[in-house]
Amino acid sequence: MLKIFTFSLGCLLLFTQCQNTPTPPKAAPVTTMQEMPELELPQVNAITKEGVIQFADGTSRPIPHYGEQGWMTLFLVRHCEKDKTIADNPPLTAEGQARAERLGRVMDNAVLDKIASTNTKRTLETAQAVRRWAGDPVMENFPFEAQNDWLAENLEMGSGKRIFYIGHQNSVPVMLNNLTASIRYKNIPDLDFGRFYIAVTQGVGKTEVLEMRY
């Protein structure tokens, strides 16, 4: 009888100990660059003609290899807010037009050789705002399906050039992945229109990318 009682008491103590053991905390989810909150990306105010990025907090940094032969500088953004009440080839909303003007002011003193975009109303209207502020550089546009050919041609002939590209939530990451020979960049979230990328490149797989907001 004593042995049975001792065994039962041991089981009871073990059960109580298990009940009081705290549940280990769950690991925090890994945050990728594409999921970073808006405030964690620096806010760009201007790009100077010397290739210096000026940020909203008063700091600045030069764009790597800016103007060096053998390097091309690509500025990449998604088009601004579109009118979702129009299904077929929508233009920008009033909010989108205001954002496009803000983007243009960022590029006011920058020196651009070319502005390129896909051939939709929302990308062309965004591009026109940048063009007005950036000294009326050459404009190019093409269908989304021709983007890879456009990039290959400009990588071959664009050494030393500075090109501003306006695309879409999927086409901008596609171009960045092509440049970096990676799958690092995911589609931009549907309601996120403020991403601003600078890709400094010598060709596929030889690209440095800076990511910020405007």
Image (cartoon, rainbow, N blue to C red):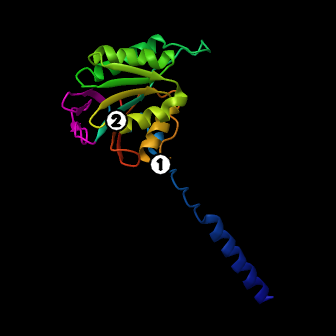
On the question of residue 150 being in view, the answer is yes
Q: Position of residue 80 (x, y in %)?
A: 45, 21
Label 2 environment density (alpha carbons within 10 Å; few <14, some 14–19, many ≥20): few
Label 1 environment density (alpha carbons within 10 Å; few <14, some 14–19, many ≥20): few
Identify which residue, 32 or 133, lies in the foreground: 133
Q: Residue at x 36, y 23 (%)?
A: 115
* Image height of 5 relative to 114, above or below: below
* Image height of 33 relative to 27, above or below: above
Residue positioned most to the right: 1
Q: In the rendered image, which residue does mark 2 sit on?
A: 157
Return the mark for residue 182: 1
Q: Secondary structure at mark 2?
A: helix
| 160 inside magenta stretch | no
Where, quadrant-wise, is the C terminus in this rendering? Answer: top left
On the question of residue 190 being in view, the answer is no
Q: Secondary structure at mark 1?
A: loop
Residue range of the region highlighted in magenta in the rendering: 44-70
Q: Position of residue 174 (x, y in %)?
A: 50, 38
Identify which residue, 88 or 213, lies in the foreground: 88
Q: Residue at x 76, y 89 (%)?
A: 3
Return the mark for residue 135: none
Where, quadrant-wise, is the N terminus in this rendering? Answer: bottom right
* Image height of 111 relative to 7, above or below: above
Q: Amino acid at mark 1?
A: Ser
| Pair 1/2: label in front | 2
